[in-house]
Image (spheres, rainbow, N blue to C red):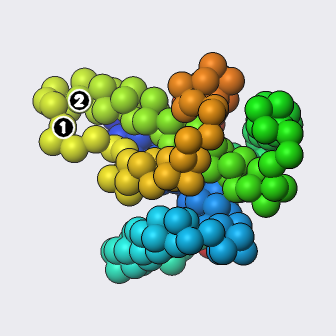
Amino acid sequence: MNTDESTALRCAYIPYVALCIAWDYADTVCDIAAQMRVDKLKKPCRLLRDLRRRYDSFRQRFLPPDHLRQEARHAQAFLDGNADVLRWFNSTLTDRIRSIQPDLDPRYLYLLLAAYQAIAVVKAIKMYAADADKLLDDISGAKSAHSVIPDEALALFELIGVFIGDFPLPLSDPMLCRFAQSLYQSLSEIEFEFNPD
């Protein structure tokens, strides 16, 4: 495989690895919301779970199980390799949320943590995809018709925002942006070995 082919494969693969992580956070959001039994979160949960089912179903039809397992392994390797950054973000975000609303129900705190984490991961995917799109356009010599960012990542970003609602910690907060930037940097630098089971 030549360098251009290797680069193209990597550019197209990495967003799906990161999306595995975002989906895990989104699943946590839905699980907590279901435990809380908040009426206004039932519909967004259904929409999010339906989006996930359609995403998984589509990919299972066209990709071999080895590929999907490899993505999950690479997602876990990415999390393991960024454990310190994730701990920092989790701790800092917890402190920020508690400083804004000290008497917050612990379940809602965990829901917010998972929602903000999912959003930060998707922000990192967006940054990575912008660079990857430009690189692929340069390699091919033409503008691609579609970004490497999965459409589902954009839909996930919109739906997760509903769970945050009007909580006064904006998605443009510098701490969230710093975390997303750190994840993006790691996505840009990480090297994966592509070995089937």
Relative to the observer, which residue lies in front, 102 or 51? 102
Q: Is residue 190 visible?
A: yes
The residue to which callout 2 is attached is 137
Q: How many marks?
A: 2
Residue 184 percent coordinates (x, y):
57, 31
Q: Position of residue 51 (x, y in %)?
A: 41, 68
Task: Tell me if mark 1 has few (under 14), some (14-19) or many (20+) residues whose alpha carbon lies within 10 angstroms of its own.
Answer: few
Q: Eyeballing the image, is 106 above or below 127?
A: below
Rendered residue at 33%/53% (across/down): 151
| 66 sits to left or right of 29 | left
77 sits to left or right of 38 = right
Residue 126: x and y in percent read 43, 36
- The answer for how far apart the CA atoms under marks 1 and 2 are is 6 Å
- Vertically, is 55 above or below 182? below
**On the rendered image, what quadrant is the N terminus found in?**
top left
Q: Secondary structure at mark 1?
A: loop
| Residue 167 location (% of width, % of height) | 62, 40
Which SS class for mark 2? helix
Viewer-closest of 40 and 150 = 40
Vertical placement of residue 76 versus 50, above or below: above
Question: Residue tagged by mark 1?
Answer: 144
Along the polypeptide, which appears first: circle 1 or circle 2? Answer: 2
Cβ atoms under marks 1 and 2 closer than 8 Å: yes
